[in-house]
């Protein structure tokens, strides 16, 4: 059996099923139509099963837990998010959470698909059973904490006043920017040829840089619209510029078509929701996700670091930001339990916490050089 082909087809099927499930979920969230709930749930469960088929087939194809690169990790993150939403929604009988969660999962899956899905041999430090233990635990905990982000957004959509809505709209804009990155990257990979240019690095040597996206910023005088100094990585900045350009245009087009902000567009889907229950779900998700992150992101990580590099802690950027994320959620729980913070304040903290998770899993992996870099 061609397990690579099976895994790719299963993941594509899951993506399509989730995309279709948004429609009956949206209708059921506004109308409480029982048949729509059943159809949406059936599609979501089929998508989750298809995702698990991808994971098992990919594992068989590569011979190790498929969480060793950016494509595999983000894909597994998306799988765990759907699993976490199905679990928590079934416990609280609040299936409307899935209507808001599925688009986030699709963005995560789409983001992962931008990176190469080719199987590469593991470097020596990754050739350990701790790869599966550490990374799978981190992905699972991040997915559960992401549920807190989703329910917090739902809470704020229903309650936030004008000033808070502006900041919430900014969060929506950032999600659109990620979609812009996915769209422009996919388009260029399908229809444009990569460009390779020479540039002088910080040490004065000559290097080659391959640009997937059309060159706007460059370290080479003969290419790009803007010449940058060698102290700035023009290739990475070029990707950021394109993401904001395409994402900004996409955001404006949607605004012009619907003549509403994203918050105004989504607010009607929150009218039937219980605020106390949303706040409770967010709190419970953090109570579950935080100790799991403590295990995977710190405890298991330090054990693996000792085995791979001979030290438990080395102030690597990934380690530092994992600690910052852990301290932030510890402070959030402290404020909730001792200062009785709840509602809008803890909702914003949960959103910031999700931002830290995304920063740690994406920006630190790809932009900041370190031992954990997926670049």
Image (tube, rainbow, N blue to C red):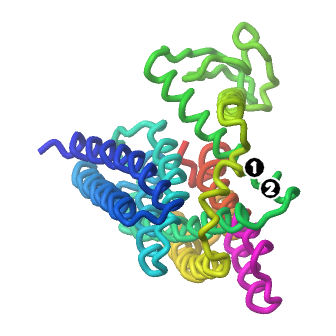
Crowdedness of circle 1 by 10 Å Cα count: few (<14), some, many (20+)? some
Q: Residue 169 carries which label?
A: 1
Counting the numbered discs, the total is 2
Q: What element carries label 1?
A: helix
Residue at the spot 53% in from the left edge and 60% down from the top edge: 30
**Could you tell me if residue 123 is visible in this image?**
no
Q: Single out the residue that lies furthest toward the left.
A: 1
> Residue 59, located in which quarter of the rendered image?
bottom left
- Residue 318 is drawn in which quadrant? bottom right
- Residue at 30%, 45% (x, y): give it: 13
Question: At numbered mark 2, what does the secondary structure look like: helix, strand or loop?
Answer: helix
Name the residue rendered at 50%, 75% in the picture: 300
The quarter of the image holding the C terminus is top right
Q: Can residue 91 be seen in this view?
A: yes
Which mark is drawn over residue 58? none
Q: Are marks 1 and 2 in contact (CB under 8 Å)?
A: yes
Drawn side of residue 155 relative to residue 92, left or right: right
Q: Closest to the observer: 79 or 251? A: 251
Residue at the right extreme of this rendering: 163
The residue tagged 2 is: 165
Residue 344 in the image, given as x and y percentages of width and height:
78, 72
Identify whether 261 is placed above or below 162: above
Residue 367 found in image quarter: top right
Horizontal side, residue 252 vs residue 97: left or right: right
In the depicted structure, whether residue 254 falls above or below residue 73: above
The span shown in magenta is: 324-351
Pick the front one: 312 or 176 = 176
Find residue 49 and report its horizontal and vertical position in percent: 28, 60
Mark 2 Cα-neighbour bin, 10 Å: few <14, some 14–19, many ≥20:
some
């Amino acid at each position: 059996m061609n397990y690579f082909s099976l895994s790719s087809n299963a993941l594509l099927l899951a993506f399509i099923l989730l995309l279709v499930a948004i429609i009956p979920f949206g209708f059921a969230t506004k109308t409480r139509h029982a048949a729509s709930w059943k159809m949406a749930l059936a599609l979501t469960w089929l998508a989750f099963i298809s995702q698990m088929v991808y994971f098992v087939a990919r594992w068989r194809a590569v011979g190790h837990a498929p969480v060793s690169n950016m494509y595999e990790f983000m894909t597994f993150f998306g799988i765990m998010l759907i699993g976490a939403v199905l679990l928590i929604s079934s416990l609280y009988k609040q299936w409307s959470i899935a209507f808001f969660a599925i688009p986030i999962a699709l963005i995560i899956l789409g983001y992962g698909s931008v990176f190469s899905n080719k199987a590469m041999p593991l470097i020596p430090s990754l050739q350990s059973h701790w790869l599966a233990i550490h990374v799978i635990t981190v992905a699972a905990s991040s997915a559960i904490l992401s549920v807190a982000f989703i329910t917090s957004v739902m809470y704020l959509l229903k309650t936030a006043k004008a000033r808070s809505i502006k900041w919430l709209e900014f969060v929506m804009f950032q999600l659109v920017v990620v979609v812009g990155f996915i769209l422009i990257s996919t388009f260029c990979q399908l229809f444009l040829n990569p460009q390779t240019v020479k540039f002088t690095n910080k040490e004065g040597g000559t290097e080659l840089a391959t640009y997937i996206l059309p060159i706007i910023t460059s370290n080479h005088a003969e290419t790009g619209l803007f010449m940058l100094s060698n102290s700035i990585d023009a290739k990475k900045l070029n990707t950021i510029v394109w993401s904001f350009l395409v994402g900004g245009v996409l955001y404006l087009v949607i605004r012009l078509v619907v003549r509403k902000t994203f918050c105004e567009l989504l607010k009607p889907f929150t009218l039937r929701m219980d605020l106390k229950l949303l706040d409770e779900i967010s709190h419970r998700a953090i109570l579950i996700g935080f100790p799991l992150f403590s295990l995977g992101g710190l405890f298991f990580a330090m054990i693996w670091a000792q085995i791979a590099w001979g030290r438990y802690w080395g102030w690597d950027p990934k380690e530092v930001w994992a600690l910052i994320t852990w301290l932030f959620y510890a402070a959030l729980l402290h404020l909730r339990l001792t200062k009785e913070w709840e509602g809008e304040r803890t909702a914003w903290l949960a959103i910031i916490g999700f931002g830290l998770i995304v920063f740690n899993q994406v920006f630190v992996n790809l932009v900041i050089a370190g031992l954990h870099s997926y670049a």
